[in-house]
Image (tube, grey):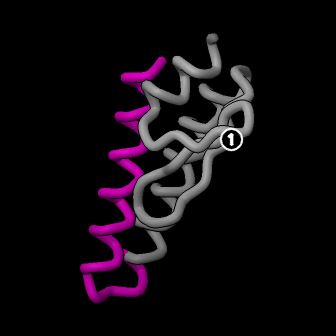
Amino acid sequence: MIETADKLFRRAALALERGNNSGNSAALKRGEKQCDACRVRAEKLLEPLGIEVDYPGLYPSFMVKGHSCHTTESAVSLALE
């Protein structure tokens, strides 16, 4: 689960970077759409554990049981305690 979520978060960030750096509005829209789709898939993996995801930048941060986590692994570990 952690590996899959991290892979999706990386793919989301790369899609947004590619679109943003393209200088092309159509490519930006495609990148944003791909980014959103990857983020939604990753968030759905973590949702059953009560992990909330926020995006202060390209990569996520997590809120678990009132605590902030900066890696998927630490968020899942805390959720399972």
In the rendered image, the quadrant that contains the C terminus is top right
Residue 76 placed where, x, y %?
54, 22
Q: Is residue 14 above or below residue 3?
A: below
Q: Residue at x 42, y 54 (%)?
A: 59
- Left or right, 8 with respect to 36, comes to left
Residue at 54 percent of width and 29 percent of height: 75
Q: Which residue is rendered at x = 64% and y = 20% of the image?
A: 79
The image quarter in which residue 63 lies: top right
Q: Residue furthest front?
A: 67
Q: Is residue 21 magenta?
A: yes
Q: Is residue 7 left or right of residue 69?
A: left
Which residue does the image show at 43% across and 25% down from the upper left?
A: 73
Q: Is residue 73 above or below residue 34?
A: above
Residue placed under numbered mark 1 in the picture? 52
Element under disc 1? strand
Q: Amino acid at mark 1?
A: Glu
Image-based side of 61 in relation to 45, left or right: left
In the image, the segment drawn in magenta is 1-27
Residue 66 position in % (x across, y down)? 73, 39
Q: Residues within 10 Å of mark 1 (few under 14, many from 20)?
A: some
- Residue at the top extreme? 81
Does 38 appear in magenta? no
Q: Position of residue 45 (x, y in %)?
A: 60, 26
Q: Nearer the viewer, residue 36 or 46?
A: 46
How many badges with numbers are in the image? 1
Whether 56 is drawn above or below 70: the answer is below
Q: Depth check: give the residue in front, 13 or 54.
A: 54
Q: Main secondary structure of the magenta part?
A: helix
